[in-house]
Image (cartoon, rainbow, N blue to C red):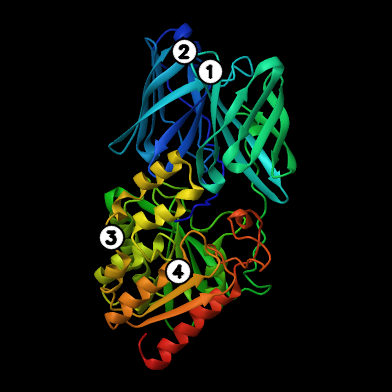
Amino acid sequence: MNRKIVVFAAAAALLALGAPIGSAAQQQSAVGTWSGMLDVPGGRLLLVIAIARQGTGLAATLQSPYQSGVTQIPVDAINTGNGKLHFSIARIGASYDGTLENGAISGTFAQRGTRYPLVLLPSALGTSDLRGTWLGTLAVGDTRLLLALEVASAGDSSLTATLDSPFQHGYEIPASSVSGANGVLSFAIPSLDASYRGTLGLQSITGTFTQRGMSLPLTLARPGSDAAIPTPVPVPTPYPTAHPHFSSRTVAFASTGGAVLAGTLTIPNHGRARMPAFVFVHGSGPGTRNGGIPQNPTFLDLSNALSNAGIVVLRYDKRGIAGSTGTATEDWHVLGNDVRAAVSFLREQPTVDPKRIFLLGHSEGGIIVPLVAPSIRGLAGIVLMAPPAVPMERIIQEQSPRMTPALRRAVTRGLASYIGIDPGNVIRGVGAPILVLQGTRDIQVLPSDLPHLVAAARNAHRRITVDLLSGDDHLFLRVPDAAPSDGSEYETAAPLDPRVAADILRWLRGLAERGAS
């Protein structure tokens, strides 16, 4: 599981809409910026809708700051009347119906048959009422982290709060000692050894975030404020080389349930014959085609390295994420259908040898790949990077000390389809050659669990190769011997360990020499 998953903020287009239903006064009551938290499998999403007058009608902008790479989500229709709000978004098959009362809009967000409760609160309150969501960008060196503080009333005039760090896949981290007295907002986050103290202005809170002795400036603003949304920082990557020997093109292919998956196909230059190809399969969370997190894009780095060495690579955004349509899910049955669709797409490419198609799964993808591999005819092999080696419920238990109760519930709910599945039993069913890569400093998928998986494969006489990469963490970043591997290293841009690509290429050469590919 990718505990640390970073997601970019994105704004949708502002569209002119048809004349709304209802009086001008009713329209005016909905005009403004509204935001609310949507509980979804595996975490939460912050949705922000800005409604403005345009002529005699309304125009709207939808933002999803937690999601990665989303560029436009057109709001096709918006209606107000009788204290109601309705809007729809055809591109993602979504709609919202709510009732305006007591200064909030309470309703239901629906997407392709699934319904989620969603309460929208106005951003126009500024600091006159601290309740609701506040966004801020924390600069840690070259890294920008989006933080979201959700403040609520405890009913006795006191305040409660939780903190989200969506770029790190951390949700509902409880705050304590929350106070807004005397024009100052202050709170502590005991589980992070962190605190915040800021001065209330008219529309923002200017203050300092302190963690483990380090103090950083942090301004909090209501959703919809440009100041609250981090600007993506250019990501230094080790690949491609100064002289890349491949080209990239954007592609799309259909999967089940009407989903269309958007991706990138990297093709080596000057290929004289059909070439071997890989499909990359994501870990948990709202993963894009680049994998990992923006400052450490595992799949982008690895695909560039492999394509520079003569291998075609297909990587794609998970369904419902970034450029892909469909409903986001962590159900392996649905995600497995997407893998099969990706393989079918690759087999249609004139540059790809249909007999030399491989799957590569990272983290959660490391259990999806062996689950679907037996159903894919003629698969040449699979690569598992930091795969779950024991049942998912045990992995969740192993990670529990680093999770809040709310996060543990969200993770368990999101990964429910894996509960009861033993990777050891699954690996026995894979007839294709297997390469397993595991970092020795991984704290999310423990190296000590790996023998269970390997023994099961060898007992079933499967062709399995295992490479332990000393000093590597879950994202296959090298961790210095004297440094802790606690996930904080994910936040600093670093090259993917070159041994990953080297090991895969060595394994492929071995297969070719033995005539197994």
Assess whether mark 4 and mark 3 are in contact (beta carbons under 8 angstroms): no
In the image, 351 versus 129, the foreground residue is 129
C-alpha distance separating marks 2 and 3: 52 Å
Mark closest to the chain's N terminus, 1 or 4: 1
Q: Tag 2: Cα neighbours inside 10 Å, few (<14), some, or many (≥20)?
A: many
> Label 3 amino acid?
Ile
Name the secondary structure under disc 2: helix
Q: Residue 456 appears in which quarter of the rendering?
A: bottom left
Q: Nearer the viewer, mark 1 or mark 4?
A: 4
In the rendered structure, the answer to whether residue 53 lies left or right of residue 362 reads right
Measured from the top left, where is residue 259 in percent x and y?
A: 33, 50
Measured from the top left, where is residue 309 in percent x and y?
A: 54, 79
Q: Nearer the viewer, mark 2 or mark 4?
A: 4
Point out which mark residue 448 bears: 4
Is residue 223 in view from this perspective? no
Mark 3 lies on residue: 421
Assess whether mark 2 and mark 1 are in contact (beta carbons under 8 angstroms): yes
Point out which mark residue 53 bears: 1
C-alpha distance separating marks 3 and 4: 19 Å
Mark 2 lies on residue: 27
Query: Measured along the vertical axis of the image, is residue 509 above or below residue 466?
Result: below
> Label 4 amino acid?
Ser
Q: Tag 4: Cα neighbours inside 10 Å, few (<14), some, or many (≥20)?
A: few
Mark closest to the chain's N terminus, 2 or 3: 2
> Label 2 amino acid?
Gln
C-alpha distance separating marks 3 and 1: 53 Å
C-alpha distance separating marks 1 and 4: 60 Å
C-alpha distance separating marks 2 and 4: 60 Å
Name the secondary structure under disc 1: strand
Measured from the top left, where is residue 308 in percent x and y?
A: 57, 76
Name the secondary structure under disc 4: helix
In the image, 496 versus 355, the foreground residue is 496
